[in-house]
Image (cartoon, rainbow, N blue to C red):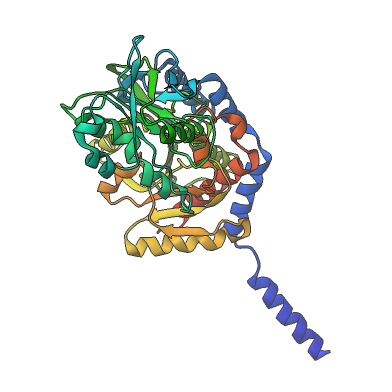
Amino acid sequence: MNRIFTLLFAFGLLFQGNAQTSEDKVIQSIFDEALTDYTSYRNLEYLCKNYPGRITGSEEVAGAVEYTFKLMKAMQLDTVFKQEVQVPHWIRGDAEKAFILSKRNGKKELPVISLGMSVGTGKKGLTASIVEVHSFEELEKLGVEKVKGKIVFFNRPMDPTMINTFGAYGGAGNQRTQGAAEAAKYGAVGALVRSLTNSLDDFPHTGVMLYDEGGRKIPAVAISTNGAELLSSWLKKEPDLTFYFENYCETLPETISYNVIGEISGSEYPDEIITVGGHIDAWEPGEGAHDDGAGCMQSIEMLRIMKELNIRPKRTIRAVMFMDEEIAQRGGQEYARQAELKNENHYFALEADRGAFQPLGFGVSAPTERLEKILDLKEYFAPYGITRFTQGGGGVDISPLGQFGTPLSSYIPEMQRYFDMHHCGNDTFEQVNFREFQMGSAAIASFIYLIDKFDL
């Protein structure tokens, strides 16, 4: 009999050691709520279908500002307000057209799209011979003699061997942002840039580009990866073929827009602010679902879940719809400027701007003593398969808060498919899976709940 009691006692201790803590139970309730409620998913659908292509200065982004403002007002948050931001106003104009003009194969239309902030050709279009390069070093070696009067075709792919697709994107990105400016130095009349995606498809991917101050401005368009492959193969057989494209974009005077902010006030430390946000602006070929309507709706969903479960945070929790991440990052800069003017204490900041795929974890940048405590929170996420908690995190919109010593974090979902949708017509609501999206919402809400609960 004594042996039986001993075994039962040991089993009891084992069971007690595996018992859920109060924090575990709250996190489970957060995931349960997220995975059984479609409110946020439907909000994302409404945003995408009614306000696609939310580039700064557009009617669509103005509508999205009003929609998210009213949405958070209806949630009866403690505070909802708009923060004025002066933003660029660039318009694409009529649809772009492009053709290969070949003596061997005739005329072949290819998908292209203007890069953001490019100048346009207008109705006259641009016809010139093509020179293909894969790096700025290669361009420099060709020099003025071989580049002047031509269209420079930047055809460096994202590195397919890199598992971190954001690293591959960064490795190829300078040809989009700086390619036209570099080509203009050698007398080029236009720039044609391979789309930044590992996918071989017919979607041209746009994104912002920059001219050198005082430098010559030449029109710049992105070509789909299938188009780039075809053009490159034709050039090998016919180096003297010509290329034609027309685009109608122009830059208008800057205009006024807004960050949209909603918050639940802290019950113990209301002056300590935790910011969670995404950017409400988006490139207009698609609906801005993964980039970054999802991050915005997940931020709002965090507040909805807290209210629904009656989680009263100790600190003030904000959801921020940042404006103008895609072009000049004015929203994040203004948010930090206002924080400094108001002497706000920003305790922690997280940005969700990597799509709405299956959550992997979080990256964190913080002083060592705080970093270790934050990364230790990963034990709470193991039951949900969320295990990647790493040093190094942040985002374009929250990075200006770093000057105040605020720990910065980035939400990290699975990344292999993100650049199939990024900045192109493929970024639609239909590409967002409900469970992946809401697993991310729950992960973010749980992470912020723990950041607030423990004095880290």
Question: Image quadrant of residue 174?
Answer: top left
Q: Residue at horizontal 21%, vertical 36%?
A: 143
Name the one closer to the observer, 419 or 446: 419
Look at 27% across and 23% down and name the residue there. 189
Say which quadrant the C terminus sits in. bottom left
Give the image location of residue 231, x and y in percent.
Answer: 45, 31
At horizontal 32% and vertical 44% (from top left) the residue drawn is 399
* Camera-nearest residue between 330 and 328: 328
Viewer-side residue, 233 vs 275: 233
Whether residue 101 is visible, yes or no, is: yes
Question: Is 20 placed left or right of 225 in the picture?
Answer: right
Which residue, as the protein is rendered here, is positioned at the far right? Answer: 1
Give the x, y percent position of residue 225: 48, 35
Q: Residue furthest bottom?
A: 2
Question: In the figure, residue 387 lies in which quadrant?
Answer: bottom right
In this view, the residue in front, 5 or 105, is 105
Q: Is residue 147 left or right of residue 310?
A: left
Q: Is residue 95 above or below residue 306?
A: above
What is the x, y in percent for residue 390?
44, 59
Count of numbered labels shown in the rendering: 0
The reply to whether residue 268 is in sight is: no
Task: Check the image and report above or below for 41 versus 418.
Answer: above
Q: Is residue 333 above or below residue 2?
A: above
Could you tell me which quadrant the N terminus lies in? bottom right
Q: Looking at the picture, how far across and down is residue 70, in whole percent?
A: 49, 23
Q: Residue at x 75, y 86 (%)?
A: 6
